Image: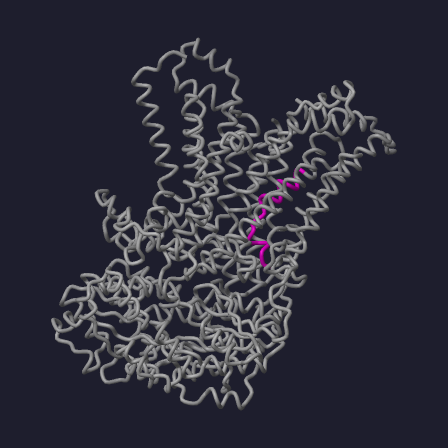
């Protein structure tokens, strides 16, 4: 019947029109190969570096950037699923260090040739090297390294009788100071990766490790929480939570909320990444933060857990991985070497606030001008301890977040045991997370 | 009604209940073929996108399979189901999901009924304005609603604490997303706000179909407004109400967007969909996650079956009748 | 209807205000947030102290940092939703026509299937679908989203259109033919004008459903090639990866709500009619 045929042909036409839309692929068909670099979101720095390296390559390759989701866990999700499906369009990836073992173990990352490994390991801060290594081999190219500093309001520190810039402070001293001056401690107590960062820094600073044998398979992983170090960490977190030393926002405070508290009337001490310096300067320029507050800000190394025992600050940042299924692994490594050159690293620090992993980059005077605390950052990175490097990092981290949150519920006598039991169950596949 | 009339000829054709099949007339065969040609594409698309994945999910649930450990993939039979069903997190999520379902549907039915009455009785001039206003929450993207409610109640960026600190229990220091109770309150509020319009429209349809003669007769008999509502309106709307409740219950049971955006499951607010998402997609444990997905699917089927068998909800006649 | 008593008028005025506040309050809240300066976002007030277009510049302006995330996402959302709506409308029209007019075995099966598909939890089918799409190359493409969107929109489209079509007096077609029109002319002149409003309303409802999707958007896409707006909101960033992009998200949320508000304003009568199965007309 006419009716039916007309309608059917309309349907077919629609489908024919639609199908090519889905099939059309991006990418140029011209001579030079295009390398896709999957990056975490930033202020445009990585895109600019990609342009610079494309120019420097002089036609050998074109480096293009594609942005991943905002938080590290989502970035890992995306990359893991695509690599598990042997995606050949992933040439370079900006990887958050804790997730590197998980991608390296099943062979999703292209092995780094020995000469490249030597070149990119020179002059790298210890923390960043540790974060790019798995089972004794370098599996990712160190790019930039992040660490948390202790930021403090000089007026408050003075009132409390502390001078963090000259002598190291301990967490206990900070807690007492905050009680004495009736202020809030700006720590990230939210149920997020930042909590794991905090726990790891505390446990490591007390001389312990969250995982005793991180390179073991899941069934044999042993946690080091039920130890004096773990108990010390639980004591600090629990006390801050119970005695309301972090304010009412503590259970949901992320890095940004911490900054807000620090800038406010009850601000005193804060542990946070260096982005806060750029953010505060930008606020002063925009007129929403008074210069007097900015002038009142001082910085020092991350607080110690036990007096006299060297602190192990948090380590974060980005290392570059090359996809194992890429068609241009050699070109990708060339591009990676260009991206992590000291000049590019200084540029990135200056403009995006992300500290270099390469010590040579800290010699750049422009860097010190933008970040007067650059040498403290460098020292912090030398002492920094990465979070446990295991392919099961996600389980460990989320397991910690489940059991060590909210901070007020953390008890040194029970939390280390319950979290150990729970995480072990999850790792053995006997519990849901 | 037309449905009845159309059903009659088909039964008439098959009425001679002989063991041998009665040969269909050519016309009936042509009609059957045409019917399948026209409805076939839609049928195929619906089946392909839903039936294949759920079967695949069932097969995946029988394996221990982690996406980043492909060499460890192994057949484990129903072990994943055993792990899930013996885990307190699963039952807690189920409990939270049921709680949200019951609370939101109960509030929405009451609120929706009120809105339906308003729209039913509104003066012509107001009708357009009211209906437009009510449709805005219906059309808004759920994620947008989640963000809007989240920002309103957030302790750092929201204004609710400032506006309502005269209410006992609410103060500047109340962190809505730090406890289970208050978090669930905001999640339910966002869900209720967004979906009440849809329920109110379903109820409005039912309300419009209550025969006016019954109502008028009750007025003549001297019944008050409340008595008319209880004795005349509601009983005649029973079927419409049950259908609305069933559809909303099925939707509420599958809640995801609001919880994902606002708390991501913190403070024991994990719901079943979020648990499945977290296990399959975040933890990359395909086997375990598929088991949760299959159980979620069975729960939804169960609710549907419960309503149809216990409450005699007749979906076909309700949704089919014009 | 005589003049309403003053008490009744006041009563209706109050009710109207209450309904308006209920419906529009969260929308106005996020609208106000979208005009706040990034540094003011934590001020805790409803209205901004300084009204600014900064957030909109960030997502739409030529120098906006989030522009490359938002504008392609908007394009994807519009394109995918429109195409999915169009295909759903066509398929549903065919199916509903068959269901309303013809008698064939399996009619009940199709309606039941539509009902069954509409209650499927999306989360349960996302991972297998991801694997399948990866294998046949539909991952991160428009078509890869359009097909699942069809499964979201077809059920309610079929049910709504079937209800509409049942109300059409099909005898008009035969009457026109008796008057001398050909089959096609009879269909076009007598039936199409009666069926068109139903198809249009169904398309509107289907569009709202496609526009609203979140789970498929975050699971079946990975780049700005196909990512729709609700999923892209997860990518928004402030000046650093730690900053909460409240302003940008609010601005994006407002932009993506504008089409909804316009459609609702223009077509509220049709939408209500469609959702109430034609029981409630103008």
> Is residue A304 toward the left or the right of residue A341 in the image?
left
In the rendered image of this protein, does residue A255 appear above or below residue B240?
below
The region drawn magenta spans C111-127
Count of numbered badges drawn on the protein = 0
Q: Is residue A271 left or right of residue B119?
A: left
> On the rendered structure, is B63 left or right of B99?
right
Query: Mainly helix, strand or loop, the magenta region?
Result: helix
Q: On the image, which quarter does residue B111 sit in? A: top left
Whether B46 is among the magenta residues is: no
* Residue name at image x 30 percent, y 22 percent: C10
Residue B222: image x %, image y %?
A: 40, 10
Residue at 33%, 54% (x, y): give it: B179
Q: Residue C17 location, x and y as percent?
A: 33, 31
Magenta stretch: includes residue C123: yes
Q: Nearer the viewer, residue C125 or B302?
A: C125
Instruction: Indicate how the structure is coloured in the image.
Output: one colour
- Give the image location of residue A120, x and y in percent: 47, 86
| Residue B14 position (above or below residue A290) | above
Q: Is residue B36 visible?
A: yes
Q: Residue at x 45, y 45 (%)?
A: C257
Assign the N terminus of chain A to one quadrant of the image.
top right
**In the image, residue C189 lies at what x, y percent?**
69, 26
The vertical placement of A16 against C173, above or below, is below
- Tell which of B205 and A324 is nearer to you: A324
Q: Looking at the image, can residue A305 be seen?
A: no
Q: Residue furthest top?
A: B220
């Amino acid at each position: 019947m006419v009716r039916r045929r007309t309608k059917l042909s309309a349907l077919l036409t629609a489908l024919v029109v639609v199908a090519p839309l889905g099939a059309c692929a991006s990418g140029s068909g011209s001579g030079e190969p295009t390398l896709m670099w999957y990056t975490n979101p930033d202020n445009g720095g990585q895109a600019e570096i990609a342009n610079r390296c494309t120019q420097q390559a002089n036609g050998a390759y074109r480096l293009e950037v594609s942005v991943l989701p905002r938080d590290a866990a989502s970035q890992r999700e995306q990359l893991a699923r695509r690599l598990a499906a042997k995606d050949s369009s992933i040439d370079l990836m900006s990887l958050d260090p804790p997730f590197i073992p998980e991608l390296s173990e099943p062979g999703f990352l292209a092995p780094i040739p020995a000469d490249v490994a030597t070149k990119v390991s020179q002059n790298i801060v210890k923390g960043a090297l540790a974060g790019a290594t798995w089972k004794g081999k370098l599996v990712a190219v160190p790019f930039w390294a992040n660490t948390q500093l202790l930021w403090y309001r000089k007026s408050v520190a003075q009132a409390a009788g502390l001078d963090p810039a000259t002598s190291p402070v301990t967490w206990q001293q900070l807690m007492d100071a905050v009680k004495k001056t009736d202020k809030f401690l700006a720590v990230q107590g939210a149920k997020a990766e930042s909590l794991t960062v905090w726990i790891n820094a505390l446990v490591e600073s007390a001389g312990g490790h969250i995982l005793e044998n991180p390179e073991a398979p899941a069934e044999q992983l042993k946690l080091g929480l039920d130890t004096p170090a773990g108990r010390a960490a639980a004591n600090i977190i629990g006390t801050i939570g119970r005695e309301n030393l972090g304010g009412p926002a503590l259970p949901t405070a992320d890095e940004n909320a911490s900054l807000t508290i620090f800038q406010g009337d009850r601000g005193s001490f804060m542990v946070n990444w260096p982005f806060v310096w750029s953010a505060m300067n930008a606020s002063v320029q925009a007129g929403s933060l008074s210069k007097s507050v900015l002038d009142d800000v001082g910085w020092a190394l991350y607080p110690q857990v036990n007096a006299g025992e060297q602190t192990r600050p948090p380590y974060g940042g980005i290392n570059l991985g090359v996809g194992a299924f890429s068609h241009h692994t050699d070109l990708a490594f060339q591009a990676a070497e260009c991206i992590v050159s000291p000049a590019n690293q200084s540029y990135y620090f200056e403009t995006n606030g992300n500290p270099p992993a390469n010590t040579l980059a800290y010699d750049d005077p422009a860097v010190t001008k933008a970040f007067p605390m650059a040498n403290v950052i460098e020292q912090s990175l030398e002492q920094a301890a990465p979070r446990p490097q295991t392919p099961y990092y996600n389980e460990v981290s989320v397991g910690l977040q489940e059991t060590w949150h909210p901070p007020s519920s953390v008890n040194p006598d029970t939390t280390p045991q319950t979290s150990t039991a729970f995480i072990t169950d999850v790792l053995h596949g006997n519990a849901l997370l | 009604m037309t449905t009845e009339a159309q059903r009659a000829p088909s039964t008439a054709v098959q009425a001679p209940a002989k063991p041998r099949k009665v040969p269909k007339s050519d016309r009936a065969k042509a009609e059957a073929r045409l019917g399948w040609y026209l409805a076939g594409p839609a049928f195929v698309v619906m089946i392909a996108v839903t039936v294949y994945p759920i079967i695949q999910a069932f097969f995946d649930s029988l394996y221990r399979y982690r996406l980043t450990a492909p060499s460890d993939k192994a057949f484990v039979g129903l072990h994943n189901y055993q792990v899930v069903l013996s885990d307190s997190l699963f039952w807690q999520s189920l409990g939270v999901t049921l709680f949200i379902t019951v609370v939101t549907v109960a509030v929405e039915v009451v609120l929706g009924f009120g809105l339906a009455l308003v729209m039913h009785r509104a003066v012509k001039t107001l009708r357009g304005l009211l209906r437009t206003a009510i449709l805005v929450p219906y059309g808004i993207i759920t994620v947008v609603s989640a963000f809007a409610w989240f920002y309103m109640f957030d302790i750092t960026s929201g204004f609710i604490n400032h506006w309502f600190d005269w209410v006992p229990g609410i103060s500047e220091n109340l962190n809505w997303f730090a406890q289970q109770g208050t978090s669930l309150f905001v999640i339910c509020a966002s869900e209720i706000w967004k979906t009440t319009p849809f329920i109110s429209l379903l109820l409005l349809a039912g309300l419009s179909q209550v025969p006016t003669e019954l109502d008028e007769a009750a007025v003549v008999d001297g019944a008050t407004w409340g008595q008319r509502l209880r004795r005349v309106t509601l009983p005649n709307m029973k079927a419409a109400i049950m259908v609305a409740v069933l559809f909303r219950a099925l939707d509420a049971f599958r809640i995801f967007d609001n919880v994902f955006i606002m708390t991501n499951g913190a403070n024991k607010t994990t719901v079943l969909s979020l648990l499945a998402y977290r296990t399959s997609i975040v933890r990359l444990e395909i086997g375990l996650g598929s088991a949760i997905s299959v159980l979620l699917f069975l729960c939804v089927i169960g609710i549907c079956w419960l309503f149809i068998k216990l409450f005699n909800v007749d979906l076909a006649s309700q949704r089919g009748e014009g | 209807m005589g003049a309403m008593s003053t008490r009744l008028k006041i009563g209706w005025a109050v009710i109207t205000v209450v309904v308006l506040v209920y419906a529009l309050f969260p929308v106005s809240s996020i609208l106000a947030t979208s005009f706040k300066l990034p540094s003011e976002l934590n001020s805790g007030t409803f209205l901004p102290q300084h009204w600014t277009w900064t957030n909109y510049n960030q997502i739409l302006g030529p120098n906006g940092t989030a522009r490359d995330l938002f504008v392609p996402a908007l394009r994807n959302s519009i394109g995918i939703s429109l195409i999915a709506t169009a295909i759903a409308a066509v398929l549903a029209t065919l199916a509903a026509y068959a269901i309303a007019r013809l008698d064939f075995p399996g009619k009940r099966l199709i309606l039941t299937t539509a009902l069954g598909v509409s209650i499927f939890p999306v989360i349960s089918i996302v991972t297998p679908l991801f694997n399948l799409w990866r294998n046949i190359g539909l991952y991160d493409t428009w078509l890869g989203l359009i097909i699942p969107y069809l499964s979201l929109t077809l059920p309610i489209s079929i049910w709504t259109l079937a209800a509409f079509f049942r109300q059409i007096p099909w005898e008009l077609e035969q009457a026109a033919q008796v008057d001398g029109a050909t089959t096609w002319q009879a269909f076009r002149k007598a039936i199409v004008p009666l069926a068109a409003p139903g198809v249009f309303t169904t398309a509107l409802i289907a569009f709202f459903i496609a526009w609203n999707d979140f789970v498929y958007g975050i699971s079946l896409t990975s780049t700005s090639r196909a990512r729709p707006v609700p999923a892209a909101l997860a990518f928004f960033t402030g000046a650093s990866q730690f900053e909460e992009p409240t302003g940008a998200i609010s601005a994006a949320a407002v932009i993506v709500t504008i089409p909804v508000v316009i459609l609702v304003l223009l077509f509220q009568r049709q939408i209500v009619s469609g959702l109430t199965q034609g029981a409630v007309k103008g």
